Every structure is written in structure tokens, then in C-alpha cells.
Image (cartoon, helix red, strand yellow):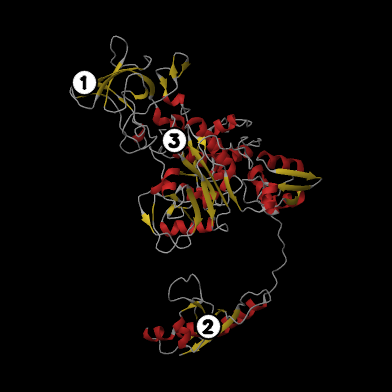
Amino acid sequence: MKISTSTLTFLNKEYGSAGNPAAGGVDDLVVRIGAQLGAVEEVVPFGAKYQGALIVRVVSCEPHPDSDHMHVCKIDDGNKTPDVDRDENGLVQVVCGAPNVRAGMTAVWLPPGATVPDTYFGPDAFVLGKRRLRGLLSNGMLASPKELALGDSHEGILEITGHIDEHGGYQPGTSFAEAYGLDGDVVIDMENKMFTHRPDCFGWLGIAREIEGIYHRPYKSPQWYTPSPEIPGVEAGELKLEVRNEIPELVPRFVAIVLGGVEVKSSPVWLQVELARAGVHSVNNIVDYTNFFMLETGQPIHAYDYDKVKALSAEDHAVLVVRKPRQGEKISLLNGKTIEPRAEAMMVATDKQLICLGGAMGGSDTEVDASTKNIIIEAATWDMYAMRRTAMAHGIFTDAVTRFTKGQSPLQNLAVTAKLVDEIRQFAGGKVASGLIDDNHVPADVMERQSLHAPVEVTRQFINERLGFDLSAGEMETLLTNVEFRVSVDGDNLTVTAPFWRTDIEIPEDVVEEVGRLYGYDHLPLELPRRSIMPVPVNPLLDVKTTIRRVLTAAGASEILSYSFVHGNLLEKAGQDAAQAFQLGNALSPYLQYMRLSLTPSLLTMVHPNQKAGYDEFALFELGLAHNTNDYDEDGLPREINSLSFVFA
């Protein structure tokens, strides 16, 4: 999971946190994260690759006299770049082959001496210079999103809109890094495995909150991040959407809404930069917004082209059906592959065909592209175990799969949907074109208390005894409320209710872990544990086994150790009934399918190899466990039958 220091600073400033987590230095921040949150795999000086990049205005753009696609441009860099050729007006000449270059646009210029950002961290970093293109001098280059490491588009240069005018804003010559918060920006890459039980930490909000917590500062989530947000009703041009959920046991919540009249285009530069920090390339504004809010909250979102879904539906409106695939059904995915989903996969279909591998990847038949005018936004919760099996079966490991296999909270779906709808309405021309559909099978008590698990009751003594601390109930309350737990204190008794995004707080020991981590395990007292010097009581069973081994080895026998699993043929050859043996559902190999009924068959298989090796007289024995389907203990579990088997050959 990647997060940049600039993103952390923005989240804290935007949402009123107490301070800048990187104020004490990146090194201190990395140490704190590693000690109290998760292992840091890499620290990347992300902003370094944009050194020298400037925001400029293209003043003139004329066709190249010796080329049918190149243009000769004069750019205004505010006279900020030294040692570069200029005309009498102080403008710099750049030859550009991009089809979208034109006079009056604002672009990003990489002057001579600058390294192309897309190559900065690679083995073949490309440093620009002055060179002649078809006979005319070009000073550096006007950069495309790909060259700036913001996206895959190389068809045109990056255009910056809405910043440079006579009223202020980014003036020609403004550093691109300074304009977009990249100066000194560092990306901290944390190991995903550390967050297996913390799906909220697969979102920037979760990480920012936890960092504030380990700095012992309070954090307050944005107002829009609430289980019960306000979502506008239909605004114009209603587009009917029907949703049917046939597998609510696997998809407990499926939220969908239609937005009409959207304008699919390139994302604003700030959004492209934010995605680049996380290693995600820009596609278009709609897809980028879904990716951005997934990165911010941990909740994956999918957008469908409404009109394509409608065209693939049997009704006169769009229909989404959440179900398992039928035998022989196939789907073409966005990665270009066509698969036949496993029988237990969770799918989204119309009432005619499959259109999405639920929670993993959309289908190519309904993708959002430049011609899209109306979209369906989906924010669903998919069963983490079914998702994991499907991802493994088909080799699909997307960012969405990474998050859904950690068990995202179904209480955040509406919050993320509402925020995304608001952003698209403001910046992509969309209008709400359907009522909100919330197919919700989350238990009523969970919805009422806005927490996945019942409040946990724990005492101050219980926590301190397990941590070796001497914290007061009030200090514990502060540590927990800093990261937005609801805590009620009555003397030394604490009642702790986890916030709606936390899925892991169920028992008192979970609260112990939370307090210890937030306070810091480095505060643990350096004291040796108390140990009893009383001798360990003799275990009669071990005593008997030791005696058996001593007697048999003294008589010349050798002990062997074999697998507890055997082949069915061995049981049959030994005259045993395989029906009485436990059969393994996930055997190590086809030859080890049954738990053995006794040790004798395993021991007998050792006779011939020893004779073949030249031993004509020997004794073997084994001490081990056997099992029988007819023998259970008082807890209803298979009884472990301690056994001895001996053979003389």
C-alpha cells in the first residue's frame, strides 16, 4: 500500500487533524510506521523526477516547414530557465509533434538538462538537450502524460486548464512540482501482508488516521465519510435501472445509481498526479475518480456504460443481476482475456449475459469510453473467501481483488457512492438519473449501531496485565478515541465500540492489541518474566513412550517415523476397511488420501526396501497416532489413538 507525504499532509489539513505527520522528518515517520502500523518496504523520492519541469504557455504554434505533422512552437516560461536560446521576445522555441498542441494552451515543458520523468528511476534515464528536428532547433520538449509518468497516453501533450490567466494562478515558469505538491514528495510503500486484518488500511484515510493515532493526536474523518450520507434524488432525464441479487449470502450489499449526461475526458492534472503517486495510471476522468476514491477509502467502485448495459438487457431499461455463472457462460474482460468463470464465482449480468466478474474486473462489453454519456456506479460488498478462490482460479489480482479479499466493511458503501456522485456532478457534467438502489442484507442491529460487532467490555486491569503497562482508563480512552472509537468509561470499566470501517474488533484481546499498538510497544518495561522453579510434573504418556523406545532400541530395533496419511490401496492390502478411515479433502498428493487406521501398514511398507538394501535380519517399530471414523471424544472430535507397531523380519 502506497501513500505519499503530500497526500498525508493534504488529508490532515483538509479534515482538520492536529498536525503534519511528516513534520518530524520522513525518517521518524517511517520508523513510527514500522514499529506501530506495518512494515515499510520502500521509501521513494517521488517528487525528484519532476525537477526542472515547468508550467508554460504556448504563445504561437506554426506548422513545421519540412514535416506534415510537426509544429514549431514558441513558449513563455516566464524567463525562468537560464542558458537557453530565446527570441527577441524572450520566448523559447520547441518543436512538437503532438496533434493537440496549439497556441494559447498551457502545457508542461521539460527544458534541456531535465530528465524525462517516465525514465527517471529506470536504468536508461533519458536526459533532454537541444537538438535539431528536421533542421529546426528544439529546446527540450513539451511532455505527454506518459512522459510525465501520469498515464499511458502518448498521443498528445498534457494540457493544464484553469490555472494561468491575468487574475493570478500558476504563472508561466511555475515549477510543475511546486504547483502539484511534488516538491520533496516521498512515497512510502507499506507491505500489504501487514494489513491482512485491516481492510481500512487499504485506503489513505485509514493510514492517515492510524498515523495520527500513533503520534497520539486525534483524527476526524471527513463529514462525507458517514454510513448515512445524503444523496440527491433524480435531477433530470430519468434512466431506469433494475437490480436483482440472487446470492445475498455472498453479496450482502449492492449499491447502484445512474448518472446521466457525463462528459468523459482526460482527468484534471491533480487527479492524475494523485493516482501516479499510488502507481496507478490515468485512464479517463470517470475511471480515475473510481480509482481515486478506492485508494482514499479502500472501497472498490465500478462504473458501467448505462446504454451498453441497456442494449444487452432484454427489458427496455438496464438490468443488473448478481448471480453465479451458468454452465458454459463466458465473459470478455477488460484485460482482453475471455474466461469461463468458475461455477462458484460471483458475477454481475444483465438478464441476458454476463458483464462483470464481480469485485474483480469489469467486462469489455460495458466499459466506459470516450463515447459514454450515461453511467451506472456500483459500490458492492463481495464475500472475501469466494473472491479469493475466484482470483486464484483465474489468476486475476487487481487492486479491487486485493481489497475485497481483506473483507471491506459493508457500512461504507453509501458514503463512497455519495462522494463519487458529488464529484462527478461537479466536475464531469453528470446529473443523477435514477433513484439510489441499496440492496442491503446487513443485519438490522449492525445498521442501527453503525458498527460491525457488538461493543466490547473490558477492564483497565485486563489491558494493563497483558501489556505490562500502568495506563489509566482515561489514557486508554484517549488512545482509542484518537482513532475514532466510541468509548464509555465507568471507573475502571471500558465499553468500546469500533467505528463502522473497522472489521477486526470483536473480543477484549482485540482492544488490548489496539491500546498496546497505539501507545507503543517500545514503552513496555524491560523486565524478565517471573518463572516458577518447580519441576515440571511427569507426563505418564511420555514416560511410557520413553520406556518403550529405550527397551526396543536396547534390543536392537530401529524406530521409524512415517506419514499419518496413506493410500487407499495400502489399507486394502492390509485387510482394512477404507470406509472407516478419514479421507482428506485437500490431500498432499493422490497417494496420501486417507488418515491411517493403524501404524502397521505403514511399517510393513518399510520391510522390502530394507531387505533390498541388504539387511536380512532387522526389527522396526513406530510410535504414532491413528484415527477411526467410529471413534470420537467427548467434544465430538476424532480421537487420537496412541499406537505402537512392531515388526521383525
What secondary structure is found at the residue carrying circle 3? helix
Farthest-out residue, right: 491
- Where in the figure is residue 435, as x and y percent of width and height? 56, 42
- Where in the figure is residue 264, as x and y percent of width and height? 42, 35
Image marks 2 and 1: residues in contact by CB distance under 8 Å? no
The residue indicated by pointer 1 is 136
Q: Nearer the viewer, mark 3 or mark 1?
A: 3
The residue indicated by pointer 2 is 579
Q: Nearer the viewer, mark 2 or mark 3?
A: 3
Quarter of the image where one finds residue 50: top left
Crowd around label 1: few <14 · some 14–19 · many ≥20 (10 Å):
some
Looking at the image, which is closer to me, 67 or 421?
A: 421
In the picture, the quarter occupied by the C terminus is: bottom left
Mark 2–mark 1 Cα distance, whole angstroms, equals 87 Å
- Residue type at mark 1: give it: Leu
- Residue type at mark 3: give it: Asn
The residue indicated by pointer 3 is 285
* Number of on-image labels: 3
Image marks 2 and 3: residues in contact by CB distance under 8 Å? no
